[in-house]
Amino acid sequence: MDSVVIDYRKTRFITSSPDIKRLPDDLGAEIAFAGRSNSGKSSALNAICDQKNLAKTSRTPGRTRLINLFEVKPGCSLVDLPGYGYAAVPEAMKRQWQKSMSEYLQKRKALRGIVVTMDIRNPLKDHDRLIIDWSLAANLPALILLTKADKLGVNKRREAVGEVKYQLSEFGGDFKVMAFSAWNKIGIDEVRQTLTNWFTMFHGAEDATGDNEAESGFNPYGSIQD
Ligand SMILES: Nc1nc2c(ncn2[C@@H]2O[C@H](COP(=O)(O)OP(=O)(O)O)[C@@H](O)[C@H]2O)c(=O)[nH]1
Ligand SMILES: [Mg+2]
């Protein structure tokens, strides 16, 4: 089977939405990015798309309250969800976040998978677990990026990945954990490969692979090895 190639460098900003309800029509394929404020989500998006300022990065946590939509190619979008876990956010807003996030993950038909960014030195905080829980409940594959992996040596990195995998084994479900660095470009090709697999999973015929992947025991993580 020929592998499908998507050029993530062509990704462009489409629109911002103040909430889930005002997103564009629920069509095509979407992959959502979620993560605590300051976990390196915007930097990850920029690195994956090889652009400096596609998603805004900031040293001030908690700034990104909007949902930002980016189009990789017609019918394939990346969705930058609002960061969470910022201490100064009032309780009512946290509850609102939980409600709209779980609704989005459960109801959005276009959603093919979710990428969760967590600082490799501080992974699996409460909201991270919630997001992963909801994704698996909604039958969505999840890719966990342990970001800022450049902060750790190779052995510590591997340990951190193993520990998170172990912690998540209780969840069952379809997820992948990997070390990632936007700065040192660790894991970029593997992430792109996973995103491409998710985007093309239900579009096998249309995207010129010729195979009906959904019916052939298709592995959503493609060629990525543990
Ligand atoms: N060492 C290191 N720092 C990073 C990396 N990615 C992001 N950061 C830093 O982490 C902070 C938050 O990054 P940002 O992408 O804005 O996080 P977001 O709030 O989750 O979108 C910034 O100060 C970034 O410079 C990385 O790969 N390595
Ligand atoms: Mg951000």
Image (cartoon, helix red, strand yellow):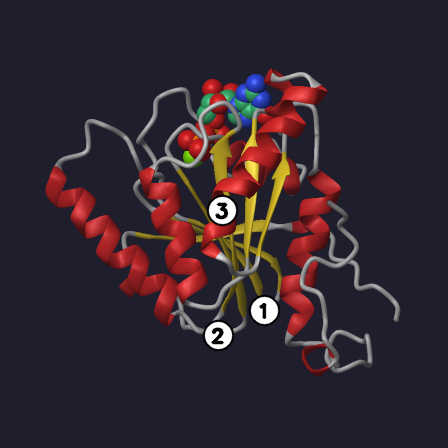
Distance Cα–Cα, label 3 vs label 1: 32 Å
Give the amino acid type for the residue marked by disc 2 in the picture.
Leu
The answer to whether mark 1 and mark 2 are in CB contact below 8 A is yes
Helix, strand or loop at disc 2?
loop
Q: 22 or 110, which is in the foreground?
A: 110
Q: 118 or 205, which is in the foreground?
A: 118
Distance Cα–Cα, label 2 vs label 3: 31 Å
> Does residue 2 appear in the picture of this structure?
yes
Q: In the picture shown, does residue 161 fall above or below 189?
A: above
Which one is earlier in the sequence, the residue at label 1 or at label 2? 2
Q: Quadrant of residue 217?
A: bottom right
- Residue 75 is labelled as 1
Direction right: furthest residue: 2
Q: 141 or 11, which is in the foreground?
A: 141
Which one is earlier in the sequence, the residue at label 2 or at label 3? 2
Q: Which residue is mark 3?
A: 168
- Residue 27 is labelled as 2
- Relative placement, left or right, of 56 versus 224 is left
Q: Position of residue 221 (x, y in %)?
A: 69, 57
Q: 81 or 147, which is in the foreground?
A: 147
Q: Position of residue 181 (x, y in %)?
A: 63, 28
Which residue is pictured at 61% across the width and 66% down the height?
74
Which residue is pictured at 45% across the width and 61% down the height?
136
Which one is earlier in the sequence, the residue at label 3 or at label 1? 1
